[in-house]
Image (cartoon, rainbow, N blue to C red):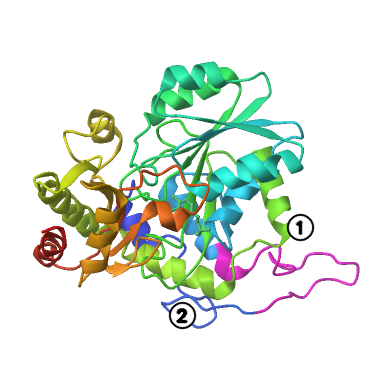
Amino acid sequence: MVKRFETIAVHAGGAPDPDTGAIAPPIHLATTFEHGPESERLHDFYYIRENNPTQARLEAALAAIEGGEKALAFASGLAAAATAMQALPPGSHVLVADDGYYDVRTIATEFLPRWGGESSLVDVADLDAVRKAFRPNTRLVFAESPSSPLLKVVDIAALAELSRRAGARLLIDSTFATPALQRPLDLGADIVMHSTTKYLGGHSDVQGGALIFKHADELATEASRVRKVLGSVASPFGSWLVLRGLRSLACRVERHSANALTLALALEAHPAVEAVHYPGLESHPAHGVALRQMRAFGGMLSFRVRGGRTAAVRVVSRLKLFTVATSLGGTESLIEHRASSEGPTSRTPDNLLRVSVGLEHVDDLIEDLQQALS
Ligand SMILES: Cc1ncc(COP(=O)(O)O)c(C=O)c1O
């Protein structure tokens, strides 16, 4: 029987505990597992830095909801991103989205050279630019769609084909979309990355990351080895919280997306707003691509305020319902002046505010933004 996403998200990795029949999975805190006199493996687990039973349940669920053969859970999204680059052969070149999570750029531009690799930044939504940026040693294209903070959308199928022809793997950071809206592996990508700190956890109370591989190939094996040696494995409690978040993902993302679209339309109509970046708007340059590859457009949007940085910061300081905080994907609406949050290496326009649209009633959110913009 072929199951639909909502059903898989509720059940994957969720078999009742074989010892007790408990419906909620146990949290196994053990750091070490019995083995034989010559270190023979007696069970699936050996030592926590390699793997643990609660994390294994989460990984089974992540592989199922993304349609991959192998998933690895990490202590954070950035640990997952770093591992994807560290697992590459020495001397590899990585093409990295210029509008992507800013510390992924830090890993690629500052740390990768220390590990013997190299990188270049490219607008991955511009396929001609990508074509020109490939080098003979390009092994990975690291893209994000929709991206942070400009909500750029990449044609994943086209980028996958281009990458394949160049002999590189394509990784999509799908944190903003979640597997409820977008399944990059079905579109031809090789690896999906998530900061599970965001929508997959869903309640702003857990940090985690994930890599899901289309094929359980040598890169997946090497990534697992890197994770073990560097110790960036997910904790049992963190794994448990993300697994619990997955159960309600489909419902939450549906509401996040509906709220965000309504809010984006209201902002677009407001005279104090210069531009709104949201893939669900017809004005978005890749709206057609988003329609093709996403089920809805997600809970993240950004907008630019007329009057520059001062006007944008004034709007943030006048809001009453939105919490001024970084991060995203929780039940509560958050807003931030993104350039100051990203710090000195930021490439974000100075008048841009990034919004994580929560699950509140959308009219309350619109009223709050309108009074702050007035
Ligand atoms: C799109 C995206 N990728 C990666 C990350 C990094 O994830 P983490 O904070 O879990 O390390 C973030 C964090 O905000 C993000 O928004």
Q: Is mark 2 within 8 Å of ligand 1?
A: no
Q: Nearer the viewer, residue 38 or 271?
A: 271
Classify residue 166 as left or right of residue 259. Answer: right
Mark 1, residue position: 229
Q: Which residues are magenta?
A: 30-56
Image coords of residue 244 (percent x, y)? 40, 70
Mark 2, residue position: 21
Residue at the (20%, 59%) spot, across then down: 255
Residue at the (38%, 63%) spot, across then down: 246
Quarter of the image with the C terminus is: bottom left
Residue at the (34%, 46%) spot, across then down: 2
Residue 94, numbered label: none
Image coords of residue 44 (percent x, y)? 68, 64
Q: Main secondary structure of the magenta part?
A: loop
Image coords of residue 155 (percent x, y)? 37, 28
Lower sequence index among marks 1 and 2: 2
Please rate how many residues cluster around mark 1, counting C-alpha atoms within 10 Å: few if below 14, some from 14 to 19, many from 20: few
Q: Nearer the viewer, residue 106 or 357?
A: 106
Q: Secondary structure at mark 2?
A: loop
Residue 4 seen in the current view? no
Residue 169 counted in the magenta span: no
